[in-house]
Amino acid sequence: MKIALGSDHAGFALKERVKETLRQGGHEVWDFGTDSDASVDYPPFILAAAQAVACGSCERAIVFGGSGNGEAMVANRLHGVRCTLCWNVESARFARAHNDSNVLSMGERLISAEVALEIVAIWLDTPFDGGRHSRRLAQIERLTGGGGNPSPAGD
């Protein structure tokens, strides 16, 4: 799988650890930076990784920061990106099964590298359930540029 990565300085060490693990697992990794733990503004690095998913160059992206919150906000600005902030394996499982997440955000200051690697494994391996979740994703798509008005009805 082609996976884009992006981080700021606060997520740099975790990005490097995940990058090594992904490559060992046979994934093609596109690293959009940053390239050190020197302080940087995160939006350009996160935007580049998310754009790789939005345009179809990569199937998924993983973005990293101190908390992962700002990184998720940047990624979700792009049409077609469904970025989820995950902090444990269950949040990762639901992100894929129910939300068909294509971008994962994690905070290096909030989770250990071991937990992050477990999250990545679950997030990569969990399929989308479809069904009622597809209807909800269609509503999100309409909200973010797919046209039409989302229906508030449904369960």
Image (cartoon, rainbow, N blue to C red):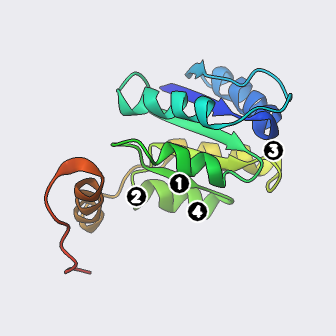
Q: Position of residue 12 (x, y in %)?
A: 78, 32
- Residue 59 visible in image: no
Secondary structure found at label 3: helix
Question: Which-is-in-front pick, marks 2 and 1?
Answer: 1
Q: Which residue is mark 1?
A: 84
Q: Earlier in the sequence, mark 2 or mark 3?
A: 2
Label 2 close to label 1 by CB (< 8 Å): yes
Residue farthest toward the right in the current orientation of the protein: 38
Label 2 close to label 3 by CB (< 8 Å): no
Q: Earlier in the sequence, mark 4 or mark 2?
A: 4
Q: Which residue is mark 3?
A: 113
Q: Earlier in the sequence, mark 4 or mark 1?
A: 1
Residue farthest toward the front in the current orientation of the protein: 41
State the residue at coordinates (46%, 48%): 76
Q: Earlier in the sequence, mark 1 or mark 3?
A: 1
Q: Which residue is mark 4?
A: 91
Label 4 close to label 1 by CB (< 8 Å): yes
Occupied quadrant, residue 151: bottom left
Q: Position of residue 71 (x, y in %)?
A: 61, 46
Q: CA distance from mark 4 to mark 2?
A: 11 Å
- Residue 13 visible in image: yes
Disc 4 residue type (three-letter)? Ser
Mark 4: give few (<14), some (14-19) or many (20+) Cα within 10 Å. Answer: some
Q: Which residue is mark 2?
A: 99
State the residue at coordinates (62%, 56%): 86
Question: Which-is-in-front pick, marks 4 and 1?
Answer: 1
